[in-house]
Amino acid sequence: MNVSSDALYDQRLAEFKRIVEGYLLSIVCICGLLGNALTCVILSSRFMRTSITNIYIFSLSCASSCVLIGFLLTHGIRSTFHAEVFYRHIFTRIFPIHVTCLLIQIYLTATVAVDRFILICLPFRGRKWRSPQRAVFVVIFVIVFCVLYCVPFWFEYTLKTENNTTVIVVSEFGSKQLYLLLMRKYLYFIFVFLIPLTIILICKISIIKKLYSVRQRKRLLGTATKTNRSSNAINFLLLSIVFIFLVTQLPYFVFNVLYTWSGTSLMMHLGARQYLSINNLLSVINASSTFILYAFFDRKFRQVGQYFLLCQPLPASFDSRTGTTRILKSSVMLSNRRSTNSNPRSSPHMRHNPIDLPKERLLSINRLP
C-alpha cells in the first residue's frame, strides 16, 4: 500500500511539475529573456541612459535575465525533457549563481524603490544623492554584497556516486548545524526577507502618500496640467514594478520562512511541493515583467523601441541628447501671449503673491527627472 501511494505521489507531482515548471515556466522564461534583452538595448542607448532611474532598471533587467536563465536550466529543461542527468551535472554550479542573482534582483528592486523615494519625497535634500556615478556605485555595492553573502552556497551540495549512479547530496559543510542555523534561518530571515521587504514597503507607502498630497495641492492651487504625464507615467511604472515584485515574491518568502523553521519535513507533503512550483512560476513572471511595464507606461521607451526595431523616426519634439520631449517654441510663445493678455497690468504687490512660492516649489518637483 505504501509503495502504491508513493508511486501515485510521484506521478501526480511529475505531471504537475511538467505542466507548471516545464511548459509554462519555459515559455515565460523565453519571452522574458527576449523582453529583458530589448529593455537592456533600449535603456543603454544614448536616448535613454541619461536617466538615473534607467541605470537601476538596466541593472535590474540584467539580473532578471540571469534569474530566468537559471530557472530555465534547473527547472524548465529538467521538467520538460526529464533531463535528470543534465540536471545533476549542472546543479552544483548553477545553484549558487542562481541564488546570487535572485538576491541581486531583490536588492536592486529595493534600490529602485529607494531611488524613487528620494526623488519624490526628498526632491531638494536628495539631489546630492542622485547622480550617475552614485547609481553605478550603488549597483556595484549591491552586487559585491550579494556575491559575498552567497559564497557559502557554493559548498552546500556535492555529487556522490552510489551503485554507479551519481546523486546530489548535502555536503558535510552544508549539513553542519551552525550553517543551517545561520544561512537557512536567521541570516535568511534578516537579509533576504526582513530588510528588503521593509525597505520596499516603507518606500512604496511613502511615495503613494506623497503623490496623493501633491495631487491634492495641485488641485487646490489650480496648477494641474497635462505636461506632467511623463513624470506620472514613470512613477506608475516603478510603483508597478514594486507591486508585482511584492505580489509574486511574498508567497515565495513565506514558503522559505516556513521551510527554514519546519525543515525538510515540509517537503514531504504534495501540496508543499506544488506550492513551491507555483512560486517558481511567479518568480519567473516577476523577472519577465519589466519590458511589458516599460512598454505600457513609458511613451519615450516606446518611441525609442520603435526607432530601433521598426526603424521609425523619432518625433520632432524628441530631444536626442537628454531623451526627453521638448516643448515646441510656438506653444510656449502662445502660452506667454495668453498669460500676457489675461494680465495686462499688475500692481507691484501682486508680483510677490505669497501663493506663488508654493506653486513654484510644486512645479519644480514635477520638473525633476
Image: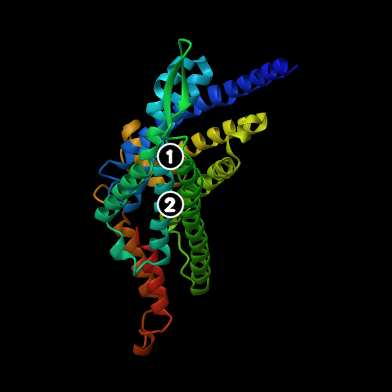
Q: Is residue 40 above or below residue 171?
A: below
Q: Is residue 122 above or below residue 250?
A: below
The Cα–Cα distance between marks 2 and 1, rounded to whole angstroms, is: 13 Å
User: In the figure, residue 367 lies in which quadrant?
Assistant: bottom left
Does residue 331 appear left or right of residue 180 in this picture?
Answer: left
SS at mark 2?
Answer: helix
Mark 1 neighbour class, 10 Å CA radius: few under 14, some 14 to 19, many 20 or more: many
> Which residue is at the far right?
1
User: Which residue is painted at 39% across and 86% down in the image?
Assistant: 350
Closer to the camera in the image, 194 or 324: 194
The image position of residue 162, as x and y in percent, is 47, 15
- Residue 359 x, y percent position in the rendering: 41, 74
The residue carrying mark 1 is 102
Q: Quadrant of the C terminus?
A: bottom left
Q: Residues within 10 Å of mark 2 (few under 14, many from 20)?
A: many
Q: Is residue 205 above or below residue 79?
A: below
Q: Would residue 352 be found to the left or right of residue 131 on screen?
A: right
Residue 332: image location, x then y, percent: 33, 63
- Report the disc number at residue 150: none
**Could you say which disc has been placed on residue 110 in the image?**
2
In the rendered view, would you say 98 is above or below 318?
above
Instruction: Describe the element under mark 1 as helix, strand or loop.
Output: helix
* Amino acid type indicated by mark 2: Ala
| Residue 318 shows up from this direction | no
In this view of the protein, which residue sits in the foreground, 148 or 306? 148
